[in-house]
Amino acid sequence: MFKFDFTPEDLSNDERVPLDTLENEVQTKSEAAANRYVTGGDEPVYAVADSFCELSLDALLSALPPMISYSAITVPLRGSTAPLVLPRRDLFDARFQLMAVDPDEEPENKESEDGETKFLNAPSDLVPGAYEGGFKTWECSIDLMAYLHGMRQDISRVKNVLELGCGTALPTSYIFQELLSDNSEGPKSHPTVLRLQDYNSTVLELVTLPNLLLAWFFSDSSKAFREAQFPNLAPPTLSSGREAGELPITPSLLDAFRRSLDCRGVALKFYSGAWLNFDVSLSANCDLVLTSETIYRTSSVPALIRVLRSTTRKCLILLAAKVVYFGVGGGVREFVEAVQKAGGCTTLVWEMNDGVGRQVLRLSF
């Protein structure tokens, strides 16, 4: 397994909270949080948590609309005048697809359909128990992408990546694009697996996969196909004047996407549901775990730590977060205390002090 150049400090076994104790804390806090969200009267009643399940790549590809609109997001880099530029699906386009229902077709599960669209009219970015903000691109995911750019020479060697609470999945999209820029010939003996988890399956369908598809389309891996089939669609750059556009989703494009994955030895895996139900065997062999803007609610932290703690000491865990989440209750200090209680340690590797402070932490257990 690939190992990064730095090694976490060893922790003695007696410093670690017993696993059954941590599991009990996860269950207790999750149930307490769920009880706060179940109300009567005219208020919506939310489920405790989605069951954990895997969504196949083929199923997600088949759910794509005939066209997706995109724009470029720019990521400032410290010490560089040239920012990163990465395409992402437009939020309005994803929401339009979510709301578009054929009037001649009744959804199989009307209640489920209503639950998916409930957040659209919500005054908040979060609808507890129903929607966890996955459609929005949050600041700290951009911070994490910038930090990953600084270690891009190591990225080509990762073999098993997991992004928790991925949402728009910009950090993984950046890694994906870097992997597709690897010009080494021939099939890979050990494929790279990129795993993406979000609370909402709809988020995976409408923004996570489309952003990965866009990252591929504007990468070197698709250059020959792109120039032959879509000569007018150039990669978005600050100087090209092509920061926005529309990408037709054709059968030939999807076939080319699948061929590139096979040729480059990259497998994409998608999972939806709460961390409480996450299959920790999936994270046990990861060499890189990413998560950003996921510690805003203290009640969900034990479940997150449960997953992070299932990794090995060779795994690099990076978490990006705001120092304080006003009005929600979470923050870096509370999270660090919870990690230490679980027998882990944290190291500050990046920070921004302007406005609401933001940090990137390296974790080890």
Image (cartoon, rainbow, N blue to C red):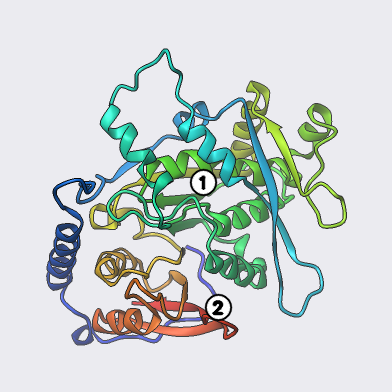
Residue flagged by tag 2: what amino acid is it?
Asp
Q: Quadrant of the C terminus?
A: bottom left
Residue 260 in picture, x, y percent from top left? 65, 37
Frontmost residue, 62 versus 265: 62
Residue flagged by tag 1: what amino acid is it?
Thr
C-alpha separation, residue under disc 1 versus residue under disc 2: 30 Å
Q: Which element carries disc 1, helix, strand or loop?
A: helix
Other residues around mark 2 within 10 Å, as few (<14) / some (14–19) / many (≥20): few
Q: Are marks 1 and 2 in contact (CB under 8 Å)?
A: no
Which residue does the image show at 26% across and 87% down from the upper left? 12
Query: Horizontal placement of 350 versus 180: left or right?
Result: left
Query: Horizontal placement of 17 versus 252: left or right?
Result: left
Q: Label 2 belongs to which residue?
A: 5
Residue 339 in picture, x, y percent from top left? 31, 79
Instruction: Tell me the mark number nearer the camera, choosing from 1 and 2.
Output: 1
Of label 1 and label 2, which has the lower sequence position? 2
Q: Which element carries disc 2, helix, strand or loop?
A: loop
Which residue does the image show at 54% across and 40% down from the upper left? 94
Quarter of the figure with residue 312: bottom left
Numbered marks: total: 2
Quarter of the figure with residue 79: bottom right
Instruction: Name, please, the residue furthest toward the front.
Output: 42
Q: Label 1 belongs to which residue?
A: 208
Which residue does the image show at 78% across and 46% down from the upper left? 235
Other residues around mark 1 within 10 Å, as few (<14) / some (14–19) / many (≥20): many
Frontmost residue, 99 versus 218: 99
Q: State whether residue 112 is above or below residue 333.
A: above
Query: Horizontal placement of 231 versus 27: left or right?
Result: right
Q: State whether residue 102 is above or below residue 183.
A: above
Q: State whether residue 203 is above or below residue 12.
A: above
Residue 136 in picture, x, y percent from top left? 51, 54
